[in-house]
Amino acid sequence: MRLFLLILLLIVSSREDVLQMDSSNIEEALKQRELVLVNFYADWCRFSQQLKPTFLQASDRLKDKPEVLFAAVDCDKEPSIAHKFNVNKYPTIKLFRHGDLIKKEYRSQRSAEAIEAFIRKQLESPVQLFNSEEELASRIESAKRNVIAYILDDQVQPLHSNYYKSASSLREDCGFWLGSGDWILQREEQMHRNATIYFREPNKAAEGNFEYTGPSDDYDYLKNWLTDKCVPLVREITFENAEELTEEGLPFLILFRQNDDIESEKLFNSIVTNELFDQKNSINFLVADGKRFAHPLQHLGKSEKDLPLIAIDSFRHMYLFSNFKQLGEQGKLRQFVLDLNSGKLHREFHQGPDTTPESPSDGKITQPPSSVFKQLKPAETRYSFSDKTEL
C-alpha cells in the first residue's frame, strides 16, 4: 500500500513533465522541441506500469534542458498513432528529433539514470569541427562513412542549419565534419564557393569524395541524399543491433565471414548492389562475424572452417546457399532470394526438389534447420506484444 501511494505521488507531482499526446496535439508537439522522447504504452501492460514512474523521474532530471520534451501515448486509446509509428510491443520508447522519427528505438536499461544519460548524449553536437585539411586527416576515422562540409560560417543559411539537423538524425550512421572560416575559400576544390559538402566512403582517399550538388535550401533533399549515402544497403549484424534488425520484420540474407575477410565482403556487396537492389524492401542484406555467430553455423551443420558461407534466415527456417564459389555466377544469388520469396526454398526443403522430366522426385522428405535469429527478437520478459502471432 505504501509503495502504491509513493508511485501515485510521483505521478501526480510530475504529471506536467510528461505531455500526454493524442491525435489532436501530436503533430505540433513533435515539432516544438529539438528532442521529443515518447513512451508508447498500454495500461494493461505490467511493463508499461513499471516504466511510468521511471519515465517521470527521467523527465524531472532533465528540467534544465528546455529543448527536450518527454511525452506519452496510450496506444489503446490512440491505435492510429501506434500503427503510424509501427508500435507492436509495450512499452516502446521512440525518439524524435526536429519532428523526425529516429530510426533506432531506445532499448537500453529502463532506469531514470540511463534514460537521462541517453538524452544528454543525444544533445551533444553531432558535428566535429576542424580548422585545416591536416587536422581533418589526423582525426577522421577512415574506416567509417564520413560527411565533410566546408561552410564559410553560420550565416550561410539555411544550409548551415540543415546540415546540423541532418547530422543529428544520421549521427549513428556517419561521421559528420565541418570546416569553417576564410581558409576554406583557398581550397582548390572550393572554387571560391562559400559552401561545399562531400560524402566519403570507408577507407577511401579524399579524391574519391562524392560532392553534394543538390539545392542548398532544401532540407529534405539534403537529408535524403545523406541518408542514401550513410545508410548502407549491406549492414553488419551484431549482438548489439540484432533485436532492432529482427523487428524490421524482413528475412535475413547473411554472409558469414571471418572478420578480416575483406574480399568476400566486397564481392557480396557488389553482387547485392548490382543484382538485388530491387529486393531491398523484401529482405535485409547483412554480414556477420562467423566466429561470434558460431551458433547459427552449427545449426546449419557448419563451423568456422567452412567460412565464408551465405544463408537465409526467414524467421521460420534457415537455408544454406549451396556453394559460395558460385557467388560470382550471374543471377545465382538473386535466384536464391527469389526462391525464398516464391516459397520454393520452403517447399523443396519439406518435399524435396521440384520435379522435372529430367529429375523426378525420389519422395524423400527433408526438414530445414529452424530459425536461430528469431530467438533474438524482443523478449516477452521485457515487453507485452499487441499481436503475439507476429513476434
Image: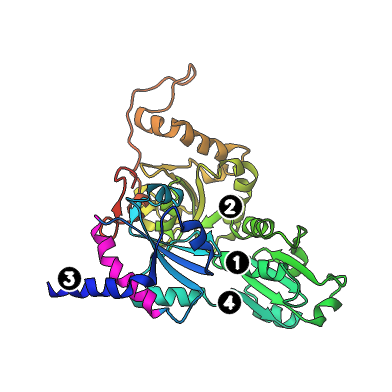
Residue picked out by circle 1: 174
Residue picked out by circle 2: 233
Left-right relation of 319 to 259: left
Q: Earlier in the sequence, mark 2 or mark 4?
A: 4
Q: Earlier in the sequence, mark 1 or mark 4?
A: 4
Q: Earlier in the sequence, mark 3 or mark 1?
A: 3
Q: Earlier in the sequence, mark 3 or mark 4?
A: 3
Residue picked out by circle 3: 4
Label 2, residues with CA under 10 Å away: few <14, some 14-19, many ≥20: some
Q: The N terminus lies in which quarter of the figure? A: bottom left
Measure the C-alpha gap from mark 1 to mark 4: 13 Å
Residue picked out by circle 4: 125
Label ID, residue 159: none
Between circles 3 and 4, the one closer to the viewer is: 3
Give residue 137's position: percent from left, percent from top.
Answer: 70, 78
Measure the C-alpha gap from mark 2 to mark 4: 27 Å
Q: Earlier in the sequence, mark 3 or mark 2?
A: 3
Label 1, secondary structure: give it.
loop
Task: Give the main secondary structure of the magenta stretch.
Answer: helix
Measure the C-alpha gap from mark 3 to mark 2: 49 Å
Between circles 3 and 1, the one closer to the viewer is: 3
Give residue 28's position: percent from left, percent from top.
Answer: 51, 60
Question: Range of the magenta residues?
Answer: 44-61
